[in-house]
Image: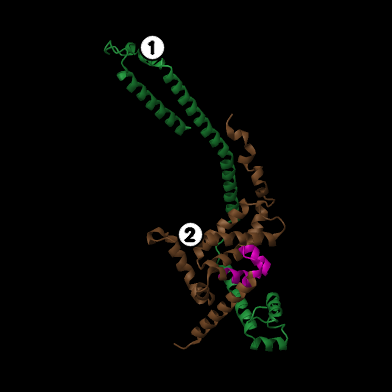
Chain colours: A brown, B green
Amino acid sequence: MPWETAIPDVLAGEQPLAGLASASSPMDSEEFAGFYERSARSLWAYLARVSCDAALADDLMQESYLRFLCAAHPTDGDVARRRYLFRIATNLLRDHWRRPRATSIEEIPEEVFRAADESAPADTKAMLGPAMKLLRPRDRQLLWLAYAEGYSHREIAEVTGLASASIRLLLFRARRKMAALLREQTSKDRRPL
Amino acid sequence: MIPGTCAREKEVAELLRSGHWPQACSLELHAHVGGCRACGNLILVTETFQRARSNAAGMARLESPGALWARAQLRRRNAAIERIGRPILGAQIFALAVSVLVAAGFLVLQFRQGAPWTSWIKDFPRSLHLEALWPSAPPTFDGHLWFVVPLLAALAVLSGVVAYVASEQE
């Protein structure tokens, strides 16, 4: 007897193994499509602004959704799902930053340069882009989650894995730094040539 | 309270969150924000980030959710197959290890008993009657392994190739 016939349900994707039971996700494809429509743009914005790389944001967004669908995600509403999705994306970003950088220009795919060129005009117009690049990745994450996504300190702690008690202080420092950079940027722009 | 923060930040943050800043803000709070560094920072950063969020969201190139769903199903299926295959691989390794141990034990035992099976190996070419397949073969090769060993090796290699080709075709 071929072994595939012994596990038809698993191969057909109808009934996963016990270990993946929670990943069988009560979310069907239509529900996922709805959730994707509601969350994808803000997730991409988070990844693109925090990483300062549009092509990387594309890749990490896809990977975030794949992991979200394969893992046992929360079933108690969109807010919790969204938070979980941001947590996956945050971990992926962290993994990306920890990975050693490519040392040779030949190792970098052509698409990276193309994507960077496409996103460049939008970035240079915005005030936030240059200021974000001067901040530490963790500060960018905290600021985006707090002021763009409107997450509370407890929610930010959940997404980033940092201690809830330290969020307030870290966020205060990051905000002060960002405000100074933005003011500096504004005064540079206003200065006559 | 962290030095440099303001007690009215919460109030300002709430107005920003609800979109009531600056229209629905009292004159008194407006005046306070004008002179308060912490509240000014809060407003500057929040407004900049909210604007950046709406700009960036419009730049997103979204993949079809159906394609993502299908890829996730494929990944889950592969993970399930891998999970099932793991114990099978373990069993195969265990079976191989047991076979090797038994073969090694058998050989040790045979050598201790004076290796009686070596005479069987000497007689093996004769038992195959290979001389019948080889009309011009020298009639006296009985007992000589110089001819049988390469032949068996060739047969083993050939059967391996046949098995590989057959499995590839499958």
Cα–Cα gap, marks 2 and 1: 65 Å
- Judge whether residue A154 is colored magenta: yes
Q: Is residue B47 above or below residue A54?
A: below
Residue at the far front in the pictured view: B112
Q: Tag 1's secondary structure?
A: helix
State whether residue A151 appears in this view.
no
- Quadrant of the frame with the N terminus of chain B: bottom right
Taking the spot 37% from the left edge, 23% from the top edge, the residue there is B155
Which is nearer the eye, A151 or B140? B140
Which is nearer the eye, B119 or A71? B119
Q: Measured from the top left, where is residue B132 in percent x and y?
A: 33, 11
Q: Residues within 10 Å of mark 1 (few under 14, many from 20)?
A: few
Chain designation of label 2: A
- Judge whether residue A20 is colored magenta: no
Chain designation of label 1: B
Which is nearer the eye, B101 or B134? B101
State which quadrant residue A73 falls in: bottom right
Q: Residues within 10 Å of mark 2 (few under 14, many from 20)?
A: few
Residue B74: assigned label: none
Taking the spot 63% from the left edge, 43% from the top edge, the residue there is A13
**Pointer 1 residue:** B127
State whether residue A143 appears in this view.
yes
**Pointer 2 residue:** A99
Q: Measured from the top left, where is residue B161 in percent x and y?
A: 40, 29
Q: Which residues are magenta?
A: A140-165
Q: Amino acid at mark 2?
A: Arg
Per the picture, the main secondary structure of the magenta-coloured stretch is helix
Q: Are marks 2 and 1 on the same chain?
A: no
